[in-house]
């Protein structure tokens, strides 16, 4: 039975008709054309699909679209208006991405980390990234980027 | 050095689209009227197919078509070709069994494609696939190559008795035996190089499209080398002439080798798009990737190193069984042969080397190149043997290596295994790595760890790679069925900006930046005025793609060659404009200058003149400023390095913690150090993953036990430390940039360095050998066994 779903995505009210089994990530990618959120696995392990739902990082492959009814969803496309969010800028500056496939999920996770912990240590960053796999960077520059991104976000909120 | 020139850590031009979610990966592309394909795959490792009933699936909601091997055969579709032919010791060619895109009468590994359902939505295709009834007769299966070569083992192909694909060798056995007869000491190892699953984070995907009006096909695919796919699929599988076939590899989310090969799904969607006259898209689920992406490594080896009483290496003998899987993947035969045995000299002067390799078919996913491809396997054996010898002969491992390094003044150095190294300096590289790792201070750290109850170990590995594959004639004589040059086109636009079309493909390597640096540096124009285009066979010249750390050494050299032509033609135009002799004109900092004067024309003015040829030597010179070049390398390049790992092991849990990792590498000239370091970091974690975490496991019946991220242990951020990396540069002598390549180094040096460190930590317990991965369970068991044995003594 298709059902209708409404939510706010990147500040815009959106609605659609989905099957009950449609995942949030499918709704974002296939219905809304927001292909910045990626799918890297089918066991909820890789974190390529991380978005924010009501301000909290969520694996959008692990949530049904209908569960996001009425929620405010932010994807990588909605982080900054035309420019770069400080965390995106930090990934650029510190070469925290190579193929770019894990990157949206990494950045969405990292921003949520900084919301919880404005000055994370290297160890805290590495542990927070438990649910995000990157095959390209060896994590070294991702950790560096997140440290710098956190510092920039602290500066930005002061 | 300018801020964006050669050697500058330019931030990447391609980043913005990836950072903002605007990359275009294959699965992000949707074509008008597109249908979705789901592939039905074999659940059996080995079975005969007695029949396939597709009626129920074909009648299911949304289904447009269901195809099996019969339909493809009826259209004359060919099997997937192999691009490299090896000859056995006796001169006979390797056994090359057919590899149909969809299985005909037998399946040979779990995941072997059997049928394809094409439907309006993916969900409908998936549901219909479950309605296909395949009448399988299960057959006995074998997953291990060592088992598969034994008498009485299940046989995969009638044409390959004993499951033998080839029995190959390199070197002189009699000479090696003579060297061993003189040895004061022989170090021996039986060693396994564990099977790995590449796991690029973007799963493979493909979209086939057919244009009724023109008869042209387009394939969008997750490929490292679109022209290779066009050639193989067009000429051998689907028989589509090349001018009617376009292959686009858009943004690709990592490859590591696994996206080099021509896969069945590419042919299936392209052919099916022609049948149903609508675009057909297939995207792998990760579970499908595990059972259909070509795997890596999987060697079982016996190796022996002969030394004289002072520790000089006298000879090396290596005997390897290489698992090929159920079919031959595109470049599979080259990996355990010419990319493996030729590397066994490593950084050393070992005078005689003999290597024999049996390649064996098994009921597993085909094995092919994975980051490093043959070179990590060779390095692992050699460096583990050297450490074993050092321990047995009580010589410091660094000192034993130094005694055997190729001397600094010995280049060009001819090894006994066919390669000629052009340059290197292994002494300085090792010294730098040891200094950075505080090798001298290790004993103190070990004692301190012991006070905390931990076993601490340090391990080294030095390595040599052969990159920049390869001089076409040499590769051809060794069995390659392709040329291995690279192509580039420089298109200078009328207002002086430039588009570079390259046959190399970037799937994370940052070519759009590195190549733009080359061009900006040479032409003296702002890097913003350079665009790099790759991945679309309708745009780029015929190129061989990206693998084997070849993009800069071969693709970059092609760009340099084309730039030389642009500059030379520009000089003629400038000479005309400046009314000077061509020989008097110098090109420097973006200007053509009449030597010894201040009369000059900028590159932009010359470009404009080339396209608006009003005042132009039109009789002698064509208008325009486009040049292309093919570069065929003169030799391989030989990056090298020294890696140092330091670990701590918890006796009670067997957990190995990698506490430090130091790498010093020689990559030749470096264009962008930021990108190079990133490549090293990524390679290191793949190498560390192999040593400590990753392992592809089949049960004896050929069921894949590690088919998801729950079972296959991918390295995560908390599994690895930050790294100390540096470089020690000697230039490549035979390419115009002096570059060597950096993409695979980490994956080559790290496994041996880490395992040598693990075994150093465990050596007080009398543990001499462990196979990778050194998982907590394996380490714990080894500790238990040896503690018991010691207690019993
Ligand atoms: S797609 Fe892998 S965790 Fe969501
Ligand atoms: S950048 Fe490629 S997976 Fe992380």
Image: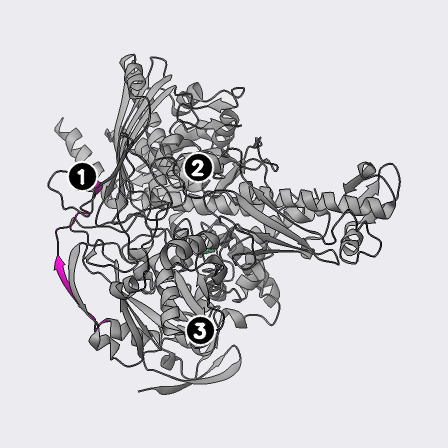
**Colouring scheme applied when the structure was drawn:** one colour
Secondary element at image label 2 = helix
Density class for disc 3 (Cα within 10 Å; few <14, some 14-19, many ≥20) is some
Q: Position of residue B28 (x, y in %)?
A: 46, 68
Q: How far is mark 2 from mark 1, CA to CA?
A: 29 Å
Residue situated furthest left in the rendering: B152
Residue situated furthest front in the rendering: B619
Can residue A154 be seen? Answer: yes
Q: How far is mark 2 from mark 3, CA to CA?
A: 44 Å
Secondary element at image label 1 = loop
Q: Mark 3 sits on what residue?
A: A29
Density class for disc 1 (Cα within 10 Å; few <14, some 14-19, many ≥20) is many
Q: Which residues are magenta?
A: B130-148
Asked if the residue at tag 3 contacts the one at tag 2, i.e. Cβ–Cβ closer than 8 Å, the answer is no
Q: Is mark 2 within 8 Å of ligand 2?
A: no
Tell me which residue sits at (29%, 40%) in the image: B772
Q: Nearer the viewer, residue A115 or B23?
A: B23
Q: Mark 1 sits on what residue?
A: B149
In the image, residue B135 lies in the stretch drawn in magenta: yes
Q: Chain of mark 3?
A: A
Mark 2 / mark 1, whichever is N-terminal: 1
In this rendering, the answer to whether A76 lies above or below B454 is below
Q: Position of residue B478 (x, y in %)?
A: 39, 35
Residue B145's quadrant in the figure? top left
Tell me which residue sits at (59%, 65%) in the image: A84
In this rendering, the answer to whether B527 lies above or below B275 is above
Q: Mark 2 sits on what residue?
A: B475
> In the drawing, does residue B144 fall left or right of residue B552?
left
Secondary element at image label 3 = helix
Density class for disc 2 (Cα within 10 Å; few <14, some 14-19, many ≥20) is some
């Amino acid at each position: 039975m298709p059902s209708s779903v409404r939510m706010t995505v990147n500040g815009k009210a959106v609605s659609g008709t989905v099957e009950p089994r449609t995942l949030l990530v499918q709704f974002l990618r296939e219905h809304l054309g927001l292909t910045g959120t990626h799918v890297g696995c089918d066991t909820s392990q890789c974190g390529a699909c991380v978005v924010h739902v009501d301000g909290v990082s969520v694996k959008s492959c692990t949530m049904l679209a209908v569960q996001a009814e009425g929620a405010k969803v932010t994807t990588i496309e909605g982080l900054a208006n035309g420019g770069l969010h400080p965390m995106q800028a930090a990934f650029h500056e510190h070469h925290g991405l190579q193929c770019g496939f894990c990157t949206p999920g990494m950045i969405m996770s990292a921003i949520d980390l900084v919301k919880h912990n404005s000055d994370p240590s290297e160890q805290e960053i590495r542990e927070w990234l438990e649910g995000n796999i990157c095959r390209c960077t060896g994590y070294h520059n991702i950790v560096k980027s997140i440290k710098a991104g956190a510092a920039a976000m602290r500066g930005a909120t002061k | 050095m300018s801020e964006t020139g050669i050697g500058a850590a330019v931030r990447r031009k391609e980043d913005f689209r990836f950072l903002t979610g605007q990359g275009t990966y294959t699965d992000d592309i949707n074509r008008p009227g597109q249908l979705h394909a789901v592939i039905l795959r074999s659940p059996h490792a080995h079975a005969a197919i007695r029949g396939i009933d597709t009626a129920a699936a074909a009648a299911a909601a949304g289904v447009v078509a269901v195809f099996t091997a019969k339909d493809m055969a009826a259209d004359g579709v060919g099997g997937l070709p192999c691009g490299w032919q090896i000859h056995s010791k006796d001169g006979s060619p390797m056994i090359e069994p057919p590899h149909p895109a969809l299985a005909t009468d037998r399946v040979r590994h779990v995941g072997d494609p059997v049928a394809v359902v094409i439907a309006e939505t993916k969900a409908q295709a998936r549901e219909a696939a479950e309605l296909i009834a395949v009448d399988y007769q299960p057959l006995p299966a074998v997953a291990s190559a060592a088992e598969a070569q034994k008498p009485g083992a299940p046989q995969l192909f009638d044409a390959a008795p004993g499951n033998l694909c080839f029995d190959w060798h390199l070197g002189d056995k009699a000479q090696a035996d003579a060297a061993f007869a003189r040895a004061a000491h022989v170090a021996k190892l039986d060693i396994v190089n564990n099977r790995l699953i590449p796991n690029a984070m973007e799963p493979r995907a493909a979209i086939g499209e057919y244009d009724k009006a023109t008869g042209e096909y387009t394939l969008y695919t997750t490929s490292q080398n679109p022209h290779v796919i066009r050639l193989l699929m067009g000429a051998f599988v689907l028989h589509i002439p090349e001018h009617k076939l376009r292959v686009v590899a858009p943004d690709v989310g990592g490859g590591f080798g696994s996206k080099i090969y021509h896969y069945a799904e590419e042919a299936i969607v392209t052919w099916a798009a022609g049948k149903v006259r609508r675009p057909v898209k297939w995207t792998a689920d990760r579970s499908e990737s595990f059972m259909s992406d070509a795997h890596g490594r999987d060697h079982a080896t016996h190796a022996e190193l002969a030394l004289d009483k002072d520790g000089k290496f006298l000879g090396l003998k290596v005997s390897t069984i290489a698992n090929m899987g159920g079919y031959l993947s595109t470049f599979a035969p080259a990996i355990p042969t010419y990319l493996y045995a030729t590397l066994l000299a490593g950084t050393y002067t070992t005078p005689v080397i003999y290597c024999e390799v049996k390649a064996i078919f098994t009921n597993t996913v085909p094995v092919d190149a994975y980051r490093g491809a043959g070179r990590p396997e060779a390095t692992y054996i050699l460096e583990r043997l050297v450490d074993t010898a050092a321990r047995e002969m009580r010589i410091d491992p660094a000192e034993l290596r130094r005694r055997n390094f190729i001397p600094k003044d010995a280049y060009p150095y001819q090894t006994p295994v066919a390669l000629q190294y052009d340059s290197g300096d292994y002494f300085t590289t090792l010294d730098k790595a040891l200094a950075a790792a505080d090798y001298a201070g290790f004993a103190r750290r070990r004692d301190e760890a012991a006070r905390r109850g931990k076993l601490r170990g340090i391990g080294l590995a030095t390595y040599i790679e052969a990159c920049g594959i390869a001089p076409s004639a040499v590769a051809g004589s060794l069995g390659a069925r392709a040329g291995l040059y690279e192509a580039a086109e420089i298109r200078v636009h009328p207002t002086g900006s430039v588009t570079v079309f390259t046959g190399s493909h970037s799937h994370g390597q940052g070519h759009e930046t590195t190549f733009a640096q080359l061009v900006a540096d040479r032409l003296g124009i702002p890097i913003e005025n350079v665009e790099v285009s790759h991945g679309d066979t309708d745009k780029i010249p015929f190129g061989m793609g990206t693998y084997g750390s070849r993009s800069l050494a071969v693709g970059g050299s092609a760009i340099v060659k084309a730039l030389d032509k642009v500059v030379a033609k520009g000089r003629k135009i400038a000479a005309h404009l400046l009314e000077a002799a061509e020989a008097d004109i110098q090109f420097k900092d973006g200007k053509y200058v009449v030597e010894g004067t201040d009369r000059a024309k900028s590159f932009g003015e010359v470009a404009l003149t080339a396209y608006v040829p009003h005042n132009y030597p039109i009789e002698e010179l064509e208008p325009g400023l486009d040049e292309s070049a093919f570069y065929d390398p003169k030799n391989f390049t030989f990056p090298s390095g020294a890696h140092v790992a330091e670990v701590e092991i918890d006796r009670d849990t067997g957990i190995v913690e990698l506490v430090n990792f130091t790498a010093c590498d020689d990559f030749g000239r470096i264009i962008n150090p930021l990108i190079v370091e990133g490549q090293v970091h990524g390679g290191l974690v793949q190498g560390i993953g192999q040593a400590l975490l990753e392992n592809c496991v089949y049960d004896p019946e050929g069921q894949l036990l590690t088919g998801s991220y729950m079972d296959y242990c991918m390295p995560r951020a908390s599994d690895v430390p930050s790294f100390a990396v540096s470089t020690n540069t000697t230039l490549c002598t035979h390419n115009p940039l002096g570059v060597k390549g950096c993409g695979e180094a980490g994956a080559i040096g790290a496994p041996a360095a880490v395992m040598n460190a693990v075994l150093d930590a465990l050596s007080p317990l009398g543990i001499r050998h462990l196979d990778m991965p050194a998982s907590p369970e394996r380490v714990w068991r080894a500790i238990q066994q040896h503690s018991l044995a010691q207690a019993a003594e």
